[in-house]
Every structure is written in C-alpha cells, then in structure tokens.
C-alpha cells in the first residue's frame, strides 16, 4: 500500500486478506485495545484489532474516525 496509515482487514465472507477498509471508525475495547470497524466498499462489513500506534496514526492521517 502506498498509504502507510491505510487500515486493512481480513474479509470473512470472501476469505480475502488485506482488504482496504473504508469509512473506518476506531474504538477502544474494554481491555484497552483498539478496534477498527468499517466496510470494503462492496457492502461487506470489516472489523480488525489494531495496536495503539497504528490506530492513532490512522486517525491522525484522516483515514479513520475516532469513536471514543
């Protein structure tokens, strides 16, 4: 990927890896982790867990919204 802050996830429905996530919203989990939820642009929902560094970088770059 050319954009380092682009969030990618595994699509369970199509079994594709590293699918770029659109309209991502990052939220904090109860245990302090970060979770991104969005879609792949084809109507499939995507969810992935992120590290703090990657989550905050995606918010700062504008590729994801902060959900907390």
Image (cartoon, rainbow, N blue to C red):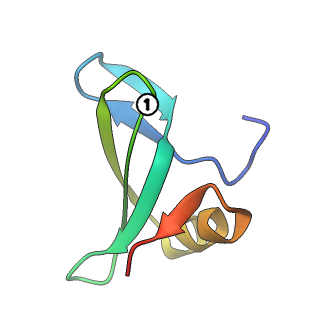
Write the residue at 50% across / 31% down.
18
Residue that badge 1 annotates: 40
Please identify the quadrant where the C terminus is shown. bottom left
Which class describes the residues within 10 Å of circle 1: few (<14), some (14-19), or many (20+)?
some
- How far from the left and from the top, in percent, is residue 54? 58, 65
Write the residue at 24% across / 27% down.
12
- How far from the left and from the top, in percent, is residue 36? 39, 57
Above or below residue 42? Residue 18 is below
Above or below residue 42? Residue 2 is below
**Element on which disc 1 rests:** loop
Is 37 in front, or is 52? 37
Write the residue at 60% across / 68% down.
59
- How far from the left and from the top, in percent, is residue 31? 23, 82
Q: Quadrant of residue 43?
A: top left
In this image, 23 relative to 61: left or right?
A: left
In this image, 54 relative to 68: left or right?
A: right
- How far from the left and from the top, in percent, is residue 9? 42, 39
Residue farthest along the right direction in this orientation: 2
In this image, 30 relative to 38: left or right?
A: left
Q: Quadrant of residue 45?
A: top left
């Amino acid at each position: 990927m050319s954009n380092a802050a682009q969030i990618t996830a595994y699509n369970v429905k199509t079994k594709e890896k590293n699918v770029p996530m659109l309209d991502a919203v990052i939220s904090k989990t109860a245990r302090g982790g970060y979770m991104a939820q969005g879609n792949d642009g084809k109507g499939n929902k995507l969810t992935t867990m992120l590290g703090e560094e990657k989550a905050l970088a995606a918010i700062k770059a504008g590729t994801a919204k902060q959900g907390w």
